[in-house]
């Protein structure tokens, strides 16, 4: 069965911040404060979902996409209907061939025309 490489980091979120800790030592590798615009309102709980190269976070009614190795914010998208709420997120592992156990033997490759971003099938933009 094919497996995605294990991330070297443990991601921790809270109070509008995300931290990447080295799994072996516990050392903080990077941290980032998640905010957008001049004002932050709403719930500061941080929900996290890890992709292959990206980390997705949600806080204050804003969804964020981060580079999981540097913490750089790639994009953010306000979702005003969830501004004062905690939200759940998921990354679709089925395109990686991970969700179907031993039946999956190959990983998918998505191109731009398939709805992906053309970077090797990592979830269409993640």
Image (spheres, rainbow, N blue to C red):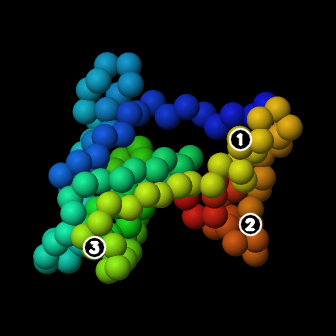
Q: Secondary structure at mark 3?
A: loop
Q: Residue furthest bottom?
A: 80
Residue 20: x, y in percent?
Answer: 32, 39
Residue drawn at (42%, 47%), measured in percent from left and top?
Answer: 68
Q: Residue furthest left?
A: 39
User: Where 50 sits versus 76, above or below?
Assistant: above
The disc label shown at residue 98, or none: 1
The disc label shown at residue 73, or none: none
User: What is the number of callouts on the image?
Assistant: 3
Task: State which tag comes first along the sequence, 2 or 1.
Answer: 1
78 or 31: nearer the eye? 78
109 or 82: nearer the eye? 82
Q: Residues within 10 Å of mark 2 (few under 14, many from 20)?
A: some
Q: Which residue is mark 3?
A: 83
Residue 25's image quarter?
top left
Left or right position of 119 against 38:
right
């Amino acid at each position: 069965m094919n497996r995605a490489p294990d991330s070297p980091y443990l991601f921790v979120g809270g109070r509008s911040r995300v931290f990447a800790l080295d799994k072996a030592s516990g050392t903080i590798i990077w941290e980032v404060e998640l905010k957008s615009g001049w004002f932050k309102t709403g719930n500061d709980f941080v929900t996290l979902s890890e992709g292959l190269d990206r980390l997705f976070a949600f806080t204050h009614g804003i969804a964020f996409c981060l580079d999981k190795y540097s913490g750089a914010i790639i994009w953010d998208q306000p979702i005003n209907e969830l501004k004062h709420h905690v939200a759940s997120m998921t990354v679709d592992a089925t395109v990686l061939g991970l969700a179907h156990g031993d039946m999956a033997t190959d990983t998918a490759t998505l191109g731009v025309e398939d709805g992906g971003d053309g970077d090797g099938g990592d979830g269409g933009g993640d």
